[in-house]
Amino acid sequence: MNPRGMHLLLDFNDVDPALLADAAHLEAVLREAAQAAGIEVRFVRFEPAGEHGGVIGILLQGDSRLGIHTWPDSGYAAIDLFMTGGQTPEFAVEVLVDRLDPCAIRQQVVKRGPRHPPDEAAAEDDNG
């Protein structure tokens, strides 16, 4: 695979519900994380998410993004970062962990991009 970007998926558990319900606080945290990672933010949107008191938010750069979806009633936040190069996602993660203080974290890293050369077994899976 010739990676075009990296997609970092974070599950934050046992976070203070008050933090997860505060859209202004979450926006400030994500802006700080984006700055730490080297993302120049060009678009921001935060709004209430569902009936559970959560927040959904996204920060975009031309080809990178940082997003969050929260469930305060469960103390849970799903966070994703997609970066295409030049940024340092580990710096963003440090800020997110420091500001949201989760008791438990699960992290997955997915390299994104076209297969090169094509993986025949995966091509079969993709087609049916």
Image (spheres, rainbow, N blue to C red):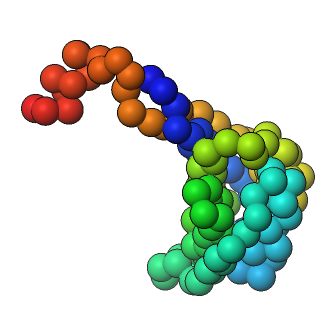
Q: Position of residue 6 (x, y in %)?
A: 59, 39
Question: Quadrant location of the C terminus?
Answer: top left
Identity of the residue furthest to the left in this view: 128
Q: Is residue 30 left or right of residue 61?
A: right
Residue nearest the viewer, comparing 21 with 87: 87
Query: Quick one: 54 or 90, which is closer to the camera?
Result: 90
Asked if 42 appears above or below 48 in the picture, the reply is: above
Identified at 61% across, 45% down, the residue is: 84
Q: Which quarter of the figure has residue 56?
A: bottom right
Q: Is residue 93 visible?
A: no
Q: Where 97 falls versus 60 (above or below)? A: above
Q: Indicate the position of residue 107 as horizontal and vertical percent values.
A: 64, 37
Picture quarter with the N terminus: top left
Question: x and y percent of residue 55 in the render?
Answer: 61, 75
The answer to whether 63 appears left or right of 97 in the picture is: left
Look at 63% across and 47% down and name the residue there.
Answer: 83
Total number of numbered discs in the rendering: 0
Where is residue 63? Give x, y as percent.
58, 57
Along the line of sight, which residue is nearer the eye, 97 or 123? 123
Query: Which residue lies at the image location 26% right of the left edge and 22% below the top edge?
Result: 122
- Residue 96, quarter of the rendered image: bottom right
- The structure residue drawn at horizontal position 20% and vertical position 32%, both measured from the top left corner, is 126
Placement of 117 over or under 49, stated as above or below: above
Left or right: residue 107 versus residue 99 is: left
118 or 110: nearer the viewer: 118
Left or right side of 41 for 100: right
Tell me if residue 64 comes above or below residue 29 in the rendering.
above
